[in-house]
């Protein structure tokens, strides 16, 4: 045992000698920003954040420290505290489950500004150094939906399907407001140009499960869905579409490289504007807005290129037109005249904006003829099951 | 077959088991293999990234023990991995291949979380704590004893059985995480009883991990004594060596299998308790974080000796932490650090071969004689 300890010590000595030999902390930036990601660049969701973080820090000329593959557990708190130890003045985490652990770090490091994407608690916790952010991605989904509707129209006109057969499929993760808001806006976008459209939604019960997403997509295709879209982070659904030759509207970024024949368009959130805004605020010692919702104007809601091979003619022009309407307020995605709930128009809805374990509805969100999404907090809260959309499995 | 003519037909090299090496020799081989692995890794680093290997190793060390916080984090993670490793060891010693620790930990964690959620505001704190502890231990033990009963009575394959139980446990956890999710439908429970801290193990020490570490330290000694000096420990070793011998000397094999797996599962339940009530205060299907599988390696590398397992789990956590820091500092993908870790572990495992076996080359004299 003694020898063992001696050897262990010797090994440690060897290691520490090596440690002394190689250090050279030449680079000394004034401000550092720390980022925490659930996965690494192999996940489209995280890649979107990683690219934006690098871009924003480059633009601002500051040092970025990126921590990837951080679980939604105490590990997130440890990572955040470690970033604070390293002198980061701004710390960001990208996954929904990181929120509680980031708040714990925020309480401990009042001099550091913390920000979190997709979270819901900043406005209720009301810490001076913890903020939530999201984007009005439902507008992006709506625009992508317009592209889908035009494609359906093209299929109807060419006699490939009848107007009644214009059924879309959607692969979702959970029956969570973010997903419901996403598929509903996509559906309403399609419906705005193709009134006869219906949609089926299949849930996988996971944010990232390539096999389940592929299976769900295949099932929808077998159900005679003629066009698919998804809200889940893997390549499962796009791949299934490419294999079956069914047009697909993607999410989080272009999947054209893998699906050259079926990819139409994709919407995504560009986080660069938010990072630049929030880091600048942290650098100047200003408070970051508790709930920041990026829009088309801020450049946060972005669409990828349109794949002419799969998209209908005139898609680009129509999208530009609708985009202008959304920007000037003449079009509202959740216009209560555009959808019904059990055959009736919605005139009032109490949403659970201040999240609690009992899901108590607390805020009136319908006024001026439309549902005010992402206004009372940045994370979506639209969770109405509107007519025309069939949910195939509600267990999730 | 006739006796081969030794001088003429001897193979160029053959492998034979060697007599036990003196301790200093075997440790010399181990250290040399680590050094060799570091050299190979250095070559790979230079070839593929062009970075300075010494800097990379320095970063690795800094990442693992560079600050007080990191040292505590390291110890906490060692404690968690060690706890699961301790849990699988009695079963392994019995040659019962329990690769279901992941699921047993999850079930222990789920039981902990359930009691915290359902009774958090209903029971007085002391009673709640007792119920939390009992529930986690019982849940882990139940999850482990099911395959043990099937093995004892119907001789089912425990490797497959325990493996499959992991997936069932994950699905059950997913289900409850969805049921209890906040906000609705998000698939995330969040920190349980954040305001009241009901059912949380008390946090000791500056970084709050001291209690976890102490509990595992006590368990380590206890399992060591159990395996080495208790009658139970002796019995399960005999069952592992030969079931027939065990039966011959009057050991009730069925009873030993079931009893040992109850212990194995109970310890996994404790790991789940420490993770959920002592660390994360929430549960996800990733709470066990692969420790159930890494523990197999920890236990094997230490030859099922709980005291050596302190070292092997330290080694693995040290490299995991260091590797993560490499990917952060050098902007390398995590897979690269996994490759480095993999090479080092491969060499360490390989060194055990050279400690136990000797490679004999046909001597040049004999070659010349032919």
Image (cartoon, coloured by chain):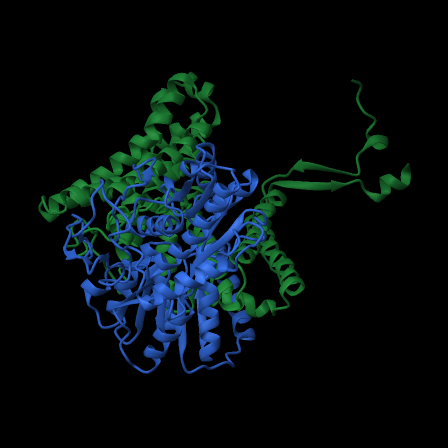
Report x, y in % for residue B96: 44, 29
Q: How many marks?
A: 0
Q: Residue at x 50, y 68 (%)?
A: B329
Q: Is residue A176 visible?
A: yes
| A74 lies left or right of B16 | left
Q: Nearer the viewer, residue B84 or A85?
A: A85
Q: Residue at x 54, y 65 (%)?
A: B57
| Residue at the (91%, 36%) spot, across then down | B370
On-image quarter of the C terminus of chain A = top left
Left-right relation of B301 to B214 = right
Q: Tell me what hue chain B is rendered in.
A: green
Which is more toward the observer, A231 or B76? A231
Q: Quadrant of residue B140?
A: top left
Q: Please state which of residues B151 and B286 is positioned toward the viewer in this rendering.
A: B286
Residue B171's place in the image compared with B27, above or below, is above
Residue B299 seen anywhere in this rendered image of the structure: no
Q: Quadrant of residue B253?
A: top left
Q: Classify A300 as above or below A189.
A: below
Q: Position of residue B279 (x, y in %)?
A: 28, 53
Quadrant housing residue A212: top left
In the rendered picture, chain A carries what hue?
blue
* Left or right of residue A236: residue A76: left
Q: How far across and down, in percent of the image, does residue A225 sit?
A: 44, 37
């Amino acid at each position: 045992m003694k020898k063992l300890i001696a050897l262990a010590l010797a090994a440690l000595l060897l290691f520490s000698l090596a440690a002394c030999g190689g250090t050279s902390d030449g680079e000394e930036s004034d401000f550092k920003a720390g980022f925490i990601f659930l996965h690494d660049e192999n996940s489209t969701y995280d890649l979107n954040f990683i690219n934006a973080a690098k871009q924003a820090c480059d633009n601002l000329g500051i040092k970025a420290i990126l921590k990837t593959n951080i679980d939604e557990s105490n590990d997130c708190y440890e990572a955040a505290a470690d970033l604070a130890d390293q002198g980061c003045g701004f710390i960001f985490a990208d996954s929904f489950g990181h929120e509680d652990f980031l708040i714990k770090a925020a309480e401990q490091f009042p001099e550091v500004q913390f920000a979190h994407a997709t979270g819901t608690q900043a406005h209720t916790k009301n810490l001076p150094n913890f903020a939530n952010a999201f984007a009005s991605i439902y507008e992006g989904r709506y625009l992508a939906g317009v592209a889908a509707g035009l494609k359906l129209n093209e299929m109807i006109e060419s006699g490939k399907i009848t107007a009644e057969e214009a059924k879309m499929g959607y692969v979702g993760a959970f029956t969570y407001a973010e997903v419901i808001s996403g598929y509903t806006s996509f559906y309403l976008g399609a419906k705005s140009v193709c009134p006869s459209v219906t949609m089926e939604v299949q849930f996988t019960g996971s944010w990232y499960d390539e096999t389940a997403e592929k299976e769900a997509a295949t099932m929808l295709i077998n159900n005679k869905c003629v066009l698919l879209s998804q809200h889940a982070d893997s390549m499962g659904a796009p791949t299934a579409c490419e294999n079956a030759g069914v047009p697909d509207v993607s999410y989080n970024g272009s999947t054209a490289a893998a699906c050259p024949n079926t990819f139409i368009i994709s919407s995504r959130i560009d986080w660069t504007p938010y990072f630049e805004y929030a880091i600048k605020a942290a650098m100047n010692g200003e408070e970051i807005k508790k709930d920041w919702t990026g829009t088309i104007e801020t450049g946060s809601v972005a669409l990828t290129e349109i794949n002419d091979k799969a998209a209908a003619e005139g898609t680009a022009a129509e999208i530009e037109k609708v985009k202008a309407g959304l920007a000037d307020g003449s079009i509202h995605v959740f216009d209560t005249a555009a959808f019904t709930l059990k055959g009736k128009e919605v005139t009032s809805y109490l949403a659970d904006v201040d999240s609690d374990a009992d899901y108590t509805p607390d805020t009136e969100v319908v006024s001026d003829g439309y549902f005010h999404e992402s206004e009372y907090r940045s994370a979506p809260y639209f969770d109405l099951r509107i007519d025309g959309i069939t949910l195939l499995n509600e267990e999730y | 077959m006739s006796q081969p003519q030794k001088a003429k037909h001897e193979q160029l090299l053959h492998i034979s088991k060697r007599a036990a090496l003196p301790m200093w020799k075997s440790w010399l081989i181990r250290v040399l293999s680590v050094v060799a692995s570091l050299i190979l890794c250095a070559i790979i680093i230079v070839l593929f990234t062009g970075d300075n290997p010494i800097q990379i190793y320095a970063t690795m060390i800094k990442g693992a023990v560079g600050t007080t916080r990191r040292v505590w984090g390291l110890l906490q993670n060692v404690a968690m991995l060690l706890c699961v490793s301790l849990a699988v060891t009695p079963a392994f010693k019995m040659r019962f291949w329990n690769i279901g620790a992941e699921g047993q930990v999850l079930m222990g964690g789920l039981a902990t979380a359930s009691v915290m959620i359902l009774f958090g505001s209903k029971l007085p704190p002391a009673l709640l704590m007792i119920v939390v502890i009992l529930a986690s231990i019982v849940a882990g033990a139940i999850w482990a004893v099911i395959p043990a009963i099937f093995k004892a009575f119907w001789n089912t394959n425990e490797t497959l059985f325990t493996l499959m139980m992991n997936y069932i446990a994950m699905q059950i956890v997913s289900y409850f995480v969805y049921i209890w999710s906040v906000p609705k439908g998000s698939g995330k429970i969040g920190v349980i009883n954040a305001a009241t801290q009901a059912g949380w193990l008390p946090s000791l020490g500056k970084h709050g991990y001291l209690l976890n570490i102490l509990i595992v330290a006590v368990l380590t000694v206890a399992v060591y004594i159990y395996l080495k000096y208790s009658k139970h420990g002796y019995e399960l070793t005999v069952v592992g060596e030969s079931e027939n011998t065990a039966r011959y000397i009057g050991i009730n094999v069925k009873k030993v299998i079931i009893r040992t797996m109850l212990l194995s599962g109970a310890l996994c339940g404790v790991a789940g308790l420490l993770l959920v009530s002592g660390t994360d205060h929430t549960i996800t299907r990733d709470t066990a974080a692969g420790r159930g599988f890494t523990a197999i390696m920890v236990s094997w590398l230490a030859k099922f000796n709980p005291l050596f397992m302190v070292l092997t789990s330290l080694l693995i956590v040290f490299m995991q932490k260091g590797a993560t820091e490499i990917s952060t500092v050098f902007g390398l993908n995590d897979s690269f650090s996994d490759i480095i870790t993999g090479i080092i572990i491969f060499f360490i495992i390989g060194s055990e071969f050279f400690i136990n076996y000797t490679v004999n080359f046909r001597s040049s004299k004999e070659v010349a004689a032919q």
